[in-house]
Image (cartoon, rainbow, N blue to C red):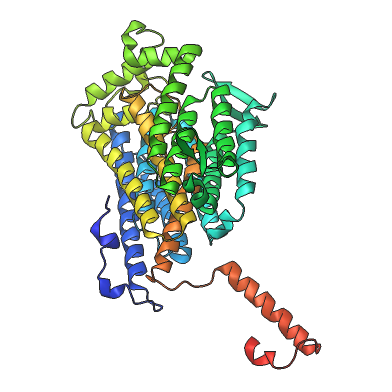
Amino acid sequence: MSTPVATNDVDPALANQTGPRSPIARRRRNTELTLIIMVGLITGAAYTVAALGTNAEIPPGIGIFVGILLALLLCAHIAVRLVARGADGTILPLAALLHGIGFVMITRLDDRLASLQATWSLIGIAVFIGTLLLVQRTSDLANRKWLFFVGGAFLLLLPMVPGVGQTFNGARIWVSIGSINFQPGEFAKIALAIFFAAYLAERRELIAAMTWKVGPFHLPEPRYILPIIVAWGFAVIVMVGERDLGSSLLFFTLFVVMMWVATENAGYLVVGAVLFGGAAYYSWSNFTHVQTRVTNWINPWDDPLDKGYQIIQSLYGLADGGLLGTGLGRGNPNQVPEAQNDFIFASIGEEFGLIGATAVLMSFVLIVGAGLRTAVRTDRTFEKLLATGLTAILGIQAFIIIGGVLKVIPLTGITLPFVSYGGSSLIANYILLALLIRVSDSAARRLNELPDDPTTSERWQAWRLSRRIRKAIKRGEVPSDFVEVVA
């Protein structure tokens, strides 16, 4: 998978130049800045066209809208330029493009939700910057793997707490604390991905050895694989109990992919496929809501006015869009219930057409390609697994919801990353994006594409240590020979 040539196709002679100029890092950041500006202009143009198609007038605040949008994107870019300047130059612009298209469609569907999404966008960018500033060494994440395990388990259980958890559309995945509503599972998936990556990086050779023989089979020692089996099983069981089948499938696939990458044993893919088939059959046999989803997938016209109505309307919308689309503001995406959430891709397909829908798909493909390239470039096992896991979350989640809308697989209620309406999803995905950029920057520094300068916290700790030593020297507690070293 490749990204635009300007990002990483750099003269090999520059690769060994690690002086303060860092030509590779500078070129990547300049490419990122150019793409960011293009994304801002594209989003502003789409917003204007949508207003023209709906109200036949240019929105009065378009200049302010574009200005605020560019300011937010430039803030994110400046943060990357300052603290992660070696990172891939296409990850942030691609996410911003998806975010912009999603925001325009949400504005098209519901002005009230658009204003809320604008607030969540501001918070998401702030959290993105905060994550980059807070996590300046990926090893800090690996050292706290059990904290992430406990935190992920707590977040998964939170919707099941009486008085706190809320049920919506049959799934108990929401938490209401006062006036704040959010989906803790969106953050749990990141926490468990970090735990899986850290634990597998530490024990992958012991797991891959498969020294435990059961009949004709060679399996990993139970004591090495039990913690990740417990974490995975706990996540899936809780998600089934909450009737959030989309997240259950996401966690299951994440677990199988990370085990495969960690052990380099394709057998995990085969075993995973068999287990998934068995679990899918059991769910279909025992859960009415699963049977309904499968029935709607096979033939939604069995109940076109009730259970199959949503998927039928989305298919009509996609068909009406054709190749070029009806045009922004000229379609009828509101005919699909909850179009801003599960079916926002159908709205994009209707008004942007096949070309616009393909552009969204290609954006996800390019992000996945950039994430997997990051995993290949790094030489640290934890970072390789973390980049793979984070990329898998984005790619699998996009496939599950887009595949459901297109009737490739049964529909499950999860959001389309960066595109669908929802604060929890947007903030969680910006945290994921920041971590992926951090891994990409870390890989670039170890490849000598730029100097591996001390982080802000490391400089602060060094200054404090230097100060303590100087005070000790003045008190006569340290030999004066240390004066030259401290200086």
Residue 365 screen position, x and y as percent: 31, 43
Residue 182 screen position, x and y as percent: 58, 34
Tell me how many marks there are: 0
In the image, is 480 to the left or to the right of 352?
Answer: right
Looking at the rendered image, the quarter that the C terminus falls into is bottom right
Residue displayed at 45% across by 50% down: 385
Residue 108 shows in this picture:
no
Q: Quadrant of residue 29?
A: bottom left
Residue 187 shows in this picture:
yes
Q: Quadrant of residue 74?
A: bottom left
The vertical placement of 319 against 466, above or below, is: above
Residue displayed at 69% across by 93% down: 481
Nearest the eye: 444 or 326: 444
Residue 415 screen position, x and y as percent: 44, 32
In the image, is 164 to the left or to the right of 10?
Answer: right
Residue 209 screen position, x and y as percent: 48, 48
Nearest the eye: 233 or 487: 233
Residue pushed farthest left?
A: 323
Residue pushed farthest front?
A: 215
Q: Quadrant of residue 484?
A: bottom right
Residue displayed at 28% across by 42% down: 362
Nearest the eye: 330 or 289: 289
